[in-house]
Image (cartoon, rainbow, N blue to C red):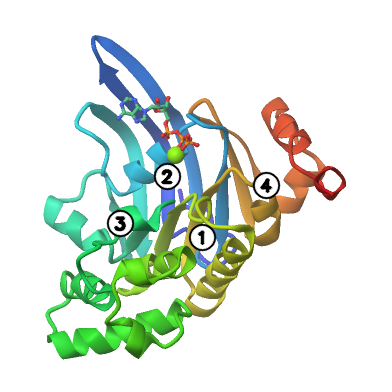
């Protein structure tokens, strides 16, 4: 049963998600039955150490896991009256969902952008993959999306190539691609790790704007508890393929229950040991 709380019903509901990988006659369990909801207009942080299952969670949601993965459980995407299990939708519907209802942003923007293609055309391409409109119409929407991603001079930048942009701007282009089709959910897998502190803070502000102004829900994967405290509404702590703690940011910071969360909070750099 869907619980009614926060802002309406969950846009994404993960239920008992299990993922294992077959490697040379061995099975590695990466996710051991995790469940969580993402509500409209919230930033949910997924924190946990390396190898705990954060990226596998994102890849499962978009069904982009490698062939040696076995997946069970449910990933329910809801929009209006329509509710569907991503794990069982047709491949046609899956293509409609990816980059259109759910988009993903990665750590390294250069790995996503095509170096030989103008950035504007990369946004246009993502729009035209989902809508039957003319290039000129798609171009207007692309510029619009660049504005939403707070890219200065979007009409001029439209014609630039990735190498002409700073790391922060490249990540904004990836975000512009991600939001171009007005998705419900953005999955951001350590989106600021490759950026310096100032630029990283600007990107996080942008996420807050996307949430507040466009109503996009964001699943934000990070190692950085400073980031979590700054912008997340809710925190999920994942440890060894299981969600061991979930709650309000302030509750978890003030009163961590699981030993792993306590350890994570203790190792957090404080102003005292930075200066
Ligand atoms: N393609 C794969 N084949 C086999 N095992 C995999 C594969 N992808 C991930 N795993 C395993 O699944 C587990 C979870 O990996 P995942 O990449 O989700 O970790 P993570 O929390 O994102 O870590 P990091 O913080 O380092 O990015 C790890 O034990 C990893 O070795
Ligand atoms: Mg990862």
Query: In this image, 31 relative to 90: left or right?
Result: right
Task: Calculate the distance from the C-alpha at mark 2 to the C-alpha at mark 3.
Answer: 26 Å
Q: Position of residue 67 (x, y in %)?
A: 19, 31
Q: Residue at x 24, y 71 (%)?
A: 122
Q: Is residue 250 left or right of residue 204?
A: right
Q: Can you identify the residue that label 2 sits on?
A: 14
- Gap in angstroms between the C-alphas marked 4 and 1: 21 Å
The tag earlier along the polypeptide, 4 or 1, is 1
Name which residue lies at 49% across and 60% down. Answer: 218
| Marks 2 and 1 in Cβ contact (< 8 Å) | no
Please tell me which residue is depicted at 27% across the width and 78% down the height of the picture. Answer: 120
Q: Are marks 4 and 1 in contact (CB under 8 Å)?
A: no
Label 3: state its secondary structure. Answer: helix
- Residue 80 seen in render: no
Mark-to-mark CA distance, 4 and 2: 23 Å
| For marks 1 and 3 on the same chain, the one whose residue lies earlier in the sequence | 1
| 179 vs 121, nearest the viewer | 121
Residue 113, label in figure:
none
On the image, numbered disc 4 is attached to which residue? 225
Q: Position of residue 89 (x, y in %)?
A: 20, 50
Query: Which residue is tagged 3?
Result: 112
């Amino acid at each position: 049963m869907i619980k009614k709380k926060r802002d309406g019903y969950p846009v994404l509901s993960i239920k008992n998600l299990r993922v294992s990988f077959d490697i040379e006659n061995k099975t590695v369990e990466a996710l051991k039955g995790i469940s969580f909801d993402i509500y409209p207009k919230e930033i949910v942080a997924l924190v946990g150490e390396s190898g705990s299952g954060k990226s596998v969670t994102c890849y499962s949601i978009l069904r982009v896991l490698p062939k040696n993965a076995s997946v069970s459980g449910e990933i329910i995407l809801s929009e209006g009256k329509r509710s569907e299990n991503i794990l069982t939708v047709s491949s046609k519907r899956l293509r409609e969902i990816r980059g259109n209802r759910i988009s993903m942003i990665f750590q390294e923007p250069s790995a996503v952008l095509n170096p030989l293609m103008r950035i504007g055309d990369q946004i246009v391409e993502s729009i035209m993959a989902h809508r039957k409109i003319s290039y000129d119409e798609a171009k207007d929407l692309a510029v619009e999306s660049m504005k939403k991603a707070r890219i200065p001079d979007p009409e001029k930048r439209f014609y630039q190539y990735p190498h002409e942009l700073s790391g922060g701007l490249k990540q904004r282009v990836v975000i512009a691609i991600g939001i171009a089709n007005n998705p419900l959910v953005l999955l951001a897998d350590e989106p600021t790790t490759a950026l310096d502190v100032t630029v990283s803070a600007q990107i996080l502000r942008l996420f807050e704007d996307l949430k507040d102004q466009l109503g996009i829900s964001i699943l934000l994967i990070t190692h950085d508890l400073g980031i979590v405290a700054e912008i997340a509404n809710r925190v999920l702590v994942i440890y060894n393929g299981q969600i061991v703690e979930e709650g309000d940011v302030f509750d978890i910071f003030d009163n961590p229950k699981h030993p792993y969360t306590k350890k994570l909070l203790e190792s957090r750099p404080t102003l005292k040991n930075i200066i």
